[in-house]
Amino acid sequence: MTADLQTREAAPNHAAVAPTKFKPLEMPELEYTPGLAKEMAPIYERVKNVIPSVEWPFFAPYVKAINDLKKERDAVILAHNYMTPEIFHCVGDIVGDSLQLAREAAKADADVIVQCGVHFMAETAKLLSPEKTVLIPDEKAGCSLAESITGADIRRLREQYPGVPVVTYVNTSADVKAETDICCTSSNAVQVVESLGVPEVLCLPDEYLAQNIARQTNVKIITYAGHCEVHERFTPEELREYRAAHPGLSIIAHPECPPEVVDEADFSGSTSGMIKWVKDNHPDKVMMVTECSMSDNVAAEVPGTDFIRPCNLCPHMKRITLPKILESLLYMKDEVVVDPAIAPRARAAVERMINLPL
């Protein structure tokens, strides 16, 4: 069942401001010298299978400058699984899916968090680490799924379905989380839904994730027509064509894909679940049906596996680049703040999920 809303209020404008307590620093030299090449050789060794040697001289000076600045700013960089390898493997301190990043950042002994991902991830990090300065290298790094729903939409849905609990995907804004009973991730959604002990729930906003959850539980799932623009483009026909072209191919799919796509896969799970499956099973050939940079990041760690890449890029994730990360640390700009009027309620929805004995 899909909740139908014809009217939508505009999503809140995300404030991105420059913290006044930090002084801007000067741009360092970004020359690729023989000395720098030697110093950066161990880092390049991590990514040599996925970054061509001809590209490394451009990346290396930025990697060096960013890693030096992290120490000076007492900063930690969170790199989502969809970041490109030069970010994920070369400057990321904590890597993983959005919730892993936020949880680990809250434990990190650092004053500054640089979120290499999209805006809702930075907001979640701020919710769980309110005392820290959270920066995003590009304030325009949004998310089609997160922007498909607002807090006002949730309030109207509660009127339409009185008494029905609202379970919201963590891939949403703080505005939406504040109107939510509990959050979920793609890896724990079934457990979260069943933990409520009710016959039906609103599971928002990803329609395909909710449909895939509904097939694994007896709880009635009311869905909403939100989609990830990366995962919604995959089709079962495409997967069958890849199997025909690559005999012996293992296919693993993210549950944000349509159910008919998931049906064609050998395994379906969250980004962290997909990575674990590859590392545990060591397939000869694998196709990861998700954002294509993740295949590059896993391939760097599983050299014996051939990765077949159906390259659907997330344009929002790709707004995050090494030059923008460097500028973020130099000038300490684009701080992510969460309205104090909604922050406690949004934080509570995330913490209810985290505190479940799953």
Image (cartoon, helix red, strand yellow):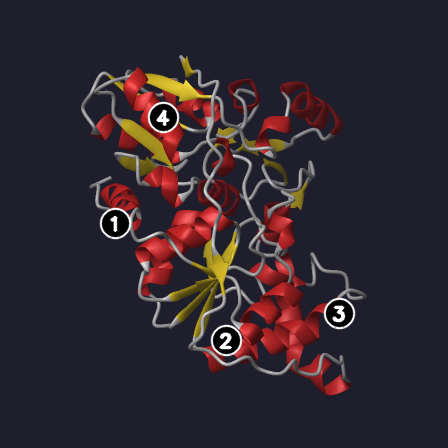
Which of pointers 2 and 1 indicates the residue nearer the eye?
1
Disc 1 or 3, which lies upstream in sequence?
3
Q: Amino acid at mark 2?
A: Lys
Structural distance between the alpha carbons of marks 2 and 1: 29 Å
Residue 308, percent from left and from top? 69, 39
Structural distance between the alpha carbons of marks 3 and 4: 44 Å
Q: Quadrant of residue 31?
A: bottom right
Residue 288, percent from left and from top? 59, 38
Which of pointers 4 and 1 indicates the residue nearer the eye?
1
Label 1 Cα crowd, 10 Å radius (few <14 / some 14-19 / many 20+): some
Which of pointers 3 and 4 indicates the residue nearer the eye?
4
At x 66%, y 42%, the residue is 313
Which of pointers 1 and 3 indicates the residue nearer the eye?
1
Structural distance between the alpha carbons of marks 4 and 2: 39 Å
Q: Which mark is residue 203?
A: 4
Disc 4 or 2, which lies upstream in sequence?
2
Residue under label 3, please give it. 58
Q: Vertically, is 334 above or below 4?
A: below
Q: Which mark is residue 344?
A: 1
Disc 4 or 1, which lies upstream in sequence?
4
Which one is nearer the viewer's eye here, 314 or 288?
Answer: 314
Residue 59, percent from left and from top? 70, 68
At x 48%, y 24%, the residue is 208
Regarding residue 303, the answer to whether it shows in the image is: no
Q: Which mark is residue 70?
A: 2
Which element carries disc 2, helix, strand or loop?
A: helix
Structural distance between the alpha carbons of marks 4 and 1: 21 Å
- Quadrant position of the C terminus in the picture: top left
Asked if residue 332 lies left or right of residue 63, the reply is: left
